[in-house]
């Protein structure tokens, strides 16, 4: 029948209002459906068949991937499923060497419309180098594929995963509720284009905890419609930091609210804590953001708000940002900046940044006090400010 019933260990993962307890689960081994752990045989259909069986199970189900290397093309793991479902990966999933085999889908592994889903362990090797080279040459390249995407997932977990060399973003959480991404390692070269580590957009109550991210773009990027995002124990670098935005891609755009980042470290990244918006009208906003207990090790722009983003002067010259930025708190930020101006607030003349609070900031450049730059901003300082303050 392609599966066996077995008594599994009890897994208790508690966060926010969501918990998973897995006992007496049905296990569906992808090798029972024809998957080959040789890294050469196409195992896409066996994976999809195992998923389909697990998804139909009336009992909590585990789709199990044993040790080995499994060649997988673009795959959609579709819900809704009848019960909670766990994808337990002990092996490595490998993308095709020929990036055209992922087509123009924009994804590699897509989980969509699934409730009570967990993806545990495993390595994703997306083989992104050839695709990046195509981009650099300006060749005829397909749409890049995100490595693992959660779309419309409620009560989800990604834990213990390692993602290597994604063509585009490594982990995407889009239009989800109550999702946790924890103990994840993300690895790509500093020069790899647009390889954001974790991207969150249009989602509520997401937790990102205890992750190591080394990549070529934002370690964590936060898009419109994000609410109640908690980030803790993040190690970022190389990369472009933790970024809210860029916002104002379009005029009618949702905002970002209630975001917290604490107890984290940035090393050798291009940015640290960044809020970025295009210099053009928008209904978007950024409010109630808290950054606390952050260490910067040789970071180019430890603290930056850029509301005048206008690459190549396309679509935004002579305009100002409509994004309203307020209630941003920076507390206990310390370390070293590779640039003289460790703090840069370049806000909109039509919508100045407001309610900015800086408390206990200790940033140096070449063993001296770093400088700061302020434009169109209103805020206050508290405690020790160990840089030339412009607020």
Image (cartoon, rainbow, N blue to C red):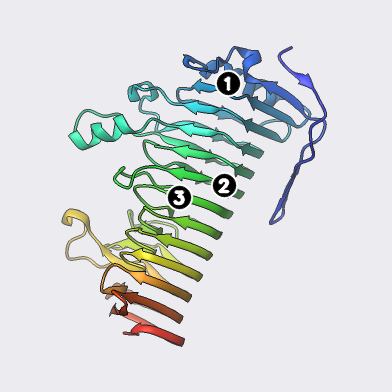
The residue mark sitting in front, 1 or 2, is 1
Front-lying residue, 248 or 362: 362
Q: Position of residue 150 (x, y in %)?
A: 54, 40
Q: Secondary structure at mark 2?
A: loop
Residue on which disc 2 sits:
176
Residues under labels 1 and 2: Cα distance? 24 Å
Front-lying residue, 101 or 239: 239
Task: State yes or no: discs 3 and 2 in contact (Cβ < 8 Å).
Answer: no
Image-based side of 321 in relation to 165, left or right:
left
The residue mark sitting in front, 3 or 1, is 3
Q: Position of residue 167 (x, y in %)?
A: 36, 36
In the rendered image, is residue 219 in sight?
Answer: yes
The residue mark sitting in front, 3 or 2, is 3
Residue on which disc 3 sits:
213
Q: Position of residue 170 (x, y in %)?
A: 44, 41
Q: Position of residue 287 (x, y in %)?
A: 47, 69
């Amino acid at each position: 029948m392609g599966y066996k019933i077995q008594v599994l260990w009890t897994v208790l993962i508690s966060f926010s209002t969501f918990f998973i307890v897995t006992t007496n689960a049905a296990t569906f081994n992808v090798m029972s459906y024809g998957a080959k752990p040789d890294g050469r045989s196409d195992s896409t259909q066996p994976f999809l068949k195992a998923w389909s069986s697990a998804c139909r199970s009336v009992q909590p189900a585990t789709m199990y991937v044993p040790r080995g290397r499994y060649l997988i093309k673009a795959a959609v793991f579709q819900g809704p499923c009848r019960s909670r479902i766990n994808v337990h990966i002990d092996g490595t999933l490998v993308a095709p060497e020929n990036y055209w085999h992922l087509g123009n889908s924009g994804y590699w592994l897509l989980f969509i419309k699934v409730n009570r889903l967990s993806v545990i362990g495993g390595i994703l090797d997306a083989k992104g180098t050839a695709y990046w080279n195509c981009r650099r040459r300006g060749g005829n390249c397909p749409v890049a594929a995100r490595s693992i995407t959660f779309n419309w997932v409620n009560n989800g977990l990604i834990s213990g995963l390692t993602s290597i060399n994604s063509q585009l973003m490594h982990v995407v959480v889009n239009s989800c509720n109550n999702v946790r991404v924890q103990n994840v390692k993300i690895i790509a070269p500093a020069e790899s284009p647009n390889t954001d580590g974790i991207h969150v957009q249009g989602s509520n109550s997401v937790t990102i905890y205890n992750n190591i991210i080394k990549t070529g773009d934002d370690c964590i990027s936060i898009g419109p419609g994000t609410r109640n995002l908690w980030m803790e124990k993040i190690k970022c670098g190389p990369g472009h930091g933790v970024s809210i935005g860029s916002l104002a891609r379009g005029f009618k755009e949702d905002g970002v609210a209630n975001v917290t980042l604490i107890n984290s470290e940035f090393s050798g990244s291009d940015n640290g804590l960044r809020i970025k918006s295009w210099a053009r009208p928008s209904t978007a906003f950024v409010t109630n953001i808290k950054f606390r207990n952050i260490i910067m090790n040789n970071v180019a722009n430890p603290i930056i708000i850029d509301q005048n983003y206008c690459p190549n002067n396309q679509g935004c010259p002579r305009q100002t940002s409509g994004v309203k930025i307020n209630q941003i708190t920076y507390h206990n930020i310390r370390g070293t900046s590779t640039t003289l101006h460790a703090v840069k607030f370049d806000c909109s003349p039509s919508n100045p940044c407001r309610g900015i609070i800086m408390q206990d900031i200790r940033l140096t450049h070449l063993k001296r006090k770093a400088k700061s730059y302020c434009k169109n901003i209103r805020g206050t300082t508290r405690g020790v400010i160990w840089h030339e303050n412009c607020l």
